Image (cartoon, rainbow, N blue to C red):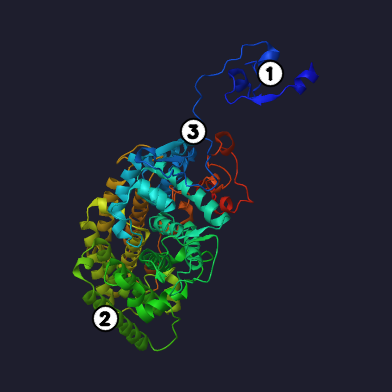
Amino acid sequence: MSENLANTPKLRNAKACEACRASKSRCVYKSQAGICQKCEQNGTQCIVRTKARPMRSRASRPSGSTGVNPATSNSDFSLSLPTVHSPDISKDIAALQQHHMSVFADGDEDGAESTGDSPQHGNGEPTVVEKRKVTLKQAEELLAKYREKASFFPFVKVPPDATVPSLSRSSPFLLLAILASASIQDRLLHHQIDHEFRRVLSSKVLLQGQRSLDFLQGLMVYIAWYPAHVNPRDTTSFMYMNLAISLLVDLGLDKETPDTIKADAAVTSTDLIDGDHFSAAARRTFLGCYYMSSAADALFPSIKRGFRKPNNRDYRDRLDKDSEGVMQEEFLTEIGSTVKLQRLVEQIGDVNCLPRVAIDPRMEALNDEVNIQMFLGNLQEWQKSTPDTVRNQVSVILAERFMEILVYSQPLGFCRMPYKDFLRDTGYRPMNLTHLTSCLTACKKYFDYLLSLPESTYLKFTTVHWGYLVHAVVAMSRLSFAMAAKLNWNAETARSQVPLVMYLDCLCYRFQIVSSVPVRTSEPAKQADVYHVFQMILGSVKKSYEKRISKLAPEPPIGHPLATTGHCPMMDYSLNLYFDPLASMDPSSFDPSGSGTPSIESTASAAPLYHDLWATMTGSWAEET
């Protein structure tokens, strides 16, 4: 029997019978018999469909794919997002509330007792955010939100006629960054898109070594709206900034002209070169990279140590030699004006960070006066050369108002970290009353304009504009005690002359309106967004400021602790559990091997693997000690 079967010619059935299809075995039949061998041996009826089944899609998402399907029609677009864990921060918020009660308690026994039950909130398991797909309609809404705030970071331009399907084909990584930055108000959606963004970044750029303008532009958009202001000790933004500078160098954008001889299979030149020169989009991205790295150096100096490599010197050298040639058509636009202001910020910082030689205090005062007048002259020159259409833009006005604060606050040491070391190094030298008064006027102009803006404008702020606000608050706080020491103010006079408490109250109220957290809750907010966190930070600053200024007495020496030290919640390590609740710390976010979907059973209790560089560097903030 076996010999007869072996000698019988076997033909493969183009349409497998249902029995072979169910058992996933090869369907082979004898000629003229009309029945396959398996059904003949089993004595079963051999049934073949008269109409073939439609073929199943066998294409699986390759490692590092953005999850954006390059659609041939609008209805086919979708962005697949993995299942992720939403960090449960209720315990940490309760701990923060208890800390505030212990630090700022006013002897109210009822208030002290009410904190006893706070840590009990949020003992449940972390919320699981189920996998979902972002539809075309949702993506178009997010793209529209991004267009509303794109003027605050004009270095990456999205064409007016660009759609989500067209961007998914031409710039998929940039589209992913746009969706991430535009979804920040929807905390859970942002958490999932952010998870996907970092997974693609680690797989495509870090492991596969791919380089393209699309990756660089996507990184710049992501960094621009990264909430670094709510966690000053988080080095993630600097890590991304280092990567962006490396990408820029690999693409050759630090050179004046493209290097046509250099060939690298990992480098994609799409939209990078236009003829013999870099494209306009590439030049704008170069300027944006300089702007963000320079601003990070100036506005967040306390977190740069050990994580930020020096700025590429070609940035400033080329701008100083031929700024108009570097910027070309962008010289008189908001891009050129913003870059020139940022270069002035760098120059002010470079001059005032020089070591001070022990000389006659009168010579130091003269040196400060010369520097202030020089930088004021540079600012006036910028104002005259900038078109009114550019100067009247909100983002440019905020930068200009902050520049006036910086011109006076830098020589006074208000931007130094820590301030008491600056006073010690300079021997508590007397401060010029005119400079103090001018700095106070500049601070008032900045806050008056900031509070005149609609609340919706705050949703457009980039990391740089949040940095302006942080430094303005710090400068005004230190200014209060410096002027009190100079003019022998008491507490009431200081409150009336420096309205910092009023400004902080107004800002807290406005950020509460913008935040998705309810206005009044009996329990700590479990799903806090960056606006709620920043409101809490400003509230802590207000309590600390009021506590210190209530103890103000006339004629304290300039080196008195009241004039040099204070409680800053952004640098208070006891509050670090609360900072940056939006940071997605799921180690699988940087898993380049799979789809990015973590196992619910395995990730709920598993610790990060320490051979995973990204998991080690981005460990959960809720577990820090």
Q: Secondary structure at mark 2?
A: helix
Write down the residue under mark 2: 377
Going from N to C along the chain, the mark reached first, 2 or 1, is 1
Along the viewing direction, whichever of 53 and 334 lies nearer the viewer? 53
Q: CA distance from mark 2 to mark 1?
A: 95 Å
Write down the residue under mark 1: 37
For this orientation, the residue located farthest to the front is 32
Name the quarter where the N terminus is drawn: top right
Q: Give percent across and percent down for residue 85.
A: 49, 39
Circle 3: residue type: Gly
Along the viewing direction, whichever of 354 and 110 lies nearer the viewer? 354
Q: Residue at x 44, y 74 (%)?
A: 257
Write down the residue under mark 3: 124
Picture quadrant of residue 97: top left
Q: Give percent across and percent down for residue 9.
A: 71, 24
Q: CA distance from mark 3 to mark 2?
A: 60 Å
Q: Give percent across and percent down for residue 67.
A: 47, 44
Q: Are marks 2 and 1 in contact (CB under 8 Å)?
A: no
Q: Is residue 547 above or below residue 408?
A: above
Q: Residue at x 57, y 39 (%)?
A: 603
Q: CA distance from mark 3 to mark 1?
A: 58 Å
